[in-house]
Image (cartoon, rainbow, N blue to C red):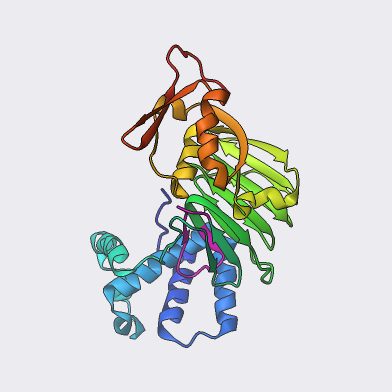
Amino acid sequence: MNATVDPDSPIGREARSWALAVLGEPFPPERSAALRRWLDADPAHARAYGEAEAVLLALGELDVLARPAVPARRHTAPVRPIAWIAGVTALAACLIAAPIILRPPPALEAADQPRQVALKDGSTAVLAPGSRLTPASRWNDRRYVLERGEAFFAVRKAEGRRFQVDVGETRIEVLGTRFNARQSASGQIRVAVEEGRVAVYEGQARRQVARLGAGDYVMVENGRAETGRLAAPADAAAWRAGRLAYADAPLGDVIADLTARGLTGLKITPRAAALRITASFQLDQADRFVASLPEILPVSIRESGGRRTIDVRAGTTSTAR
């Protein structure tokens, strides 16, 4: 978890100035652009700004902050504005209360059909069924979190400002391009590029694990990254054309995708879900694909009450790929 920024540090004071300006004065586009540059310059800036804004809104004492500071007494430390000397306990209470007062940005979700959404910066995203995308903050319109599922992004270039998508511990960063990001049910992450260039980082330290061009992809699983080439750049998001493709993926991920896309009555046991598969098929052939699984993997399919349960075939002791 990121540490709280000291409100009396240089960054904390500058964040407080920005928060006061945003909440207490007209904010023209050039000022907004300057704030974005400051926020993007260092993660600590964004963290400090969020904390400062939360305190201001939670206390509701902008009028107190606007008054002249009380002159310092002799032989004592200068008196700080009331809202900032409420003590550690009061500050902590305000920060705890802030999430209740400050509503998070609304999530973008797709049910059992793909959904195209226009993002605030002019970019677009197409969400695969069952996917959920959320803005990372209320002030940065070029940073998102793919909480689950898959999405294809067409990113608009914007004065050199980076566009970022966080998927689990992986961060995808571009200036302007077209790429697909996927987080499977098992946590496997896949990034594929249709156009432009994409940098992919992993872990809290943001270690770069791939730099991708058109037609490239990377799969990140358990902290390890493996790159490869697509048959064609257009295959970066083949699901948009109704085709699902998997390379050494857990079978459970495939079944989860089919369920999200409306194929009902499927259940898979944990042992069968761990089996790995490489496959490609049209979505309208999903039933035929499921029926053929015993020919591809050591599994059996039991039907009962309109439900099909996929399990490891009796006598199987090893995981097949």
Residue 109 appears in which quarter of the rendering?
Answer: bottom left
Along the horizontal axis of the image, is 316 left or right of 179? left
Asked if 314 appears above or below 111 in the picture, the reply is: above
Report the side of 22 relative to 241 (left or right). left
Quadrant placement of the C terminus: top right
In terms of depth relative to the viewer, which is nearer, 201 or 198? Answer: 198
Q: Nearer the viewer, residue 233 or 5?
A: 233
Residue 33 in sight from this viewpoint: yes
x, y (%) of residue 212? 72, 48
Q: Name the residue: 31% across, 65% down.
A: 98
Q: Is residue 186 visible?
A: no
Asked which quadrant contains residue 263, the reply is: top left
The residue sitting at 60% across, 51% down in the picture is 242
User: Residue 22 at what x, y percent from top left?
Assistant: 45, 79
Observer-nearest of 91 and 164: 164
Residue 21 included in the magenta stretch of the image: no
Q: Which residues are magenta?
A: 128-144
| Residue 126, above or below 225 | below
Residue 130 is one of the magenta-drawn residues: yes
Q: Residue 23: x and y, percent?
A: 41, 80
- Identify the image quadrant of residue 59: bottom left
Q: Position of residue 38 (x, y in %)?
A: 57, 68
